[in-house]
Image: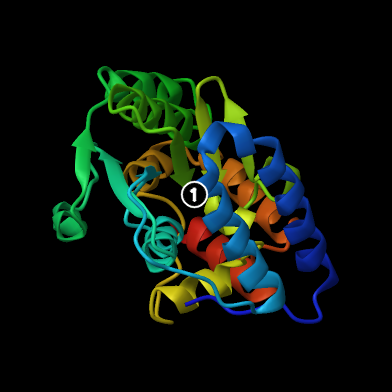
Amino acid sequence: MIGRIEDDFVKIYRIRESFEALERVKNEIGERIYERLRSLLEYRLYGKEFDRSPLDEKIVLAFSMGSDSTASLKILRWAGFNVVPVMVKLPRIKMHALNYDVVFVEIPGYMEVMNERIRKKAPICGVCHSMIMEAVEKYARENKVKIVASGDLLSSGLVSIYQKGDITTLNLPAFLAMDKREVIGVIGGKYTLSFGCPLWKTAAKNVPVLKRFAIQRVLRELRARVIDEEIALTLIYDILQK
């Protein structure tokens, strides 16, 4: 499912920071989840096999059907976690997500906020992400689930798992120091690289300045080494062609 890190100083350093971050939330997440997450890190760093029997404790996953969240779902379930994928019901959702036993939630006033951002020619991705995570966290609280996972690749090391009020946030690919090619490998090795959801693509046609913000986002991921130059160029060309 995932491979051992070998001869990559940066990834090894990030994993060691993930161990430290995990210790900070140990008392918040419960012993069984703590031990399983620690075992997952040890598997990633040392190749040490571990017990993957099913756990009763639930983890809510912010799910979009993109490569990162799909890989996160597969890894967590492979590791024995009881994962509840939660997808926000937006105009662009893919209904075949039902195949993943997805729970749908809603964000009242979502399109009003997005349309206002587009009218102001302001970036929409960051605000959209925040609104989605707030909705997923709300679902977790209402169902008494302590951990909300995401497919975030960027928030590595010490900020890959952290406490946010009464919720523990786990950015799983970042926690495991994964990059985009590893993520694509987990979901089957085939993935069409394209930037943006249908809403962003429509907005970018009407507000071309959004492409500049998108390119900056790609370059940020390149600097963080979660994508390589080939992937970055593919995404940038895709953005410019929108």
Question: Colour scheme of this structure image?
Answer: rainbow
Residue at 29% across, 46% down: 84
* Residue 165 vertical placement versus 9 (above, below): above
Q: Return the residue nearer the eye: 203 or 219.
A: 219
Residue linked to disc 1: 32
Tell me the amino acid under the disc marked 1.
Answer: Arg
Choose between 195 and 83: the one closer to the eye.
83
State the residue at coordinates (39%, 68%).
78
Q: Quadrant of residue 98?
A: bottom left
Q: Does 153 sit left or right of 157 as displayed?
A: left
Q: Position of residue 41 (x, y in %)?
A: 64, 63
* Residue 53 visible at all: yes
**Residue 204 placement: quadrant:** top left
Asked which quadrant contains residue 43, the reply is: bottom right
At horizontal 49% and vertical 63% (from top left) the residue drawn is 238
* Screen quadrant of the C terminus: bottom left
Q: Where is residue 66 shown, x and y percent of the image? A: 38, 58
Residue 44, position as x, y percentages in the image: 64, 71
Q: Secondary structure at mark 1?
A: helix
Q: Residues within 10 Å of mark 1 (few under 14, many from 20)?
A: few
Task: Tell me the residue at 46%/61% (across/down).
Answer: 241
Vertical arrangement, residue 143 with respect to residue 95, above or below: above
Which percent across, then down, holds residue 225?
Answer: 72, 63
Examine the rendering and report whether any part of residue 162 can be seen. Answer: no
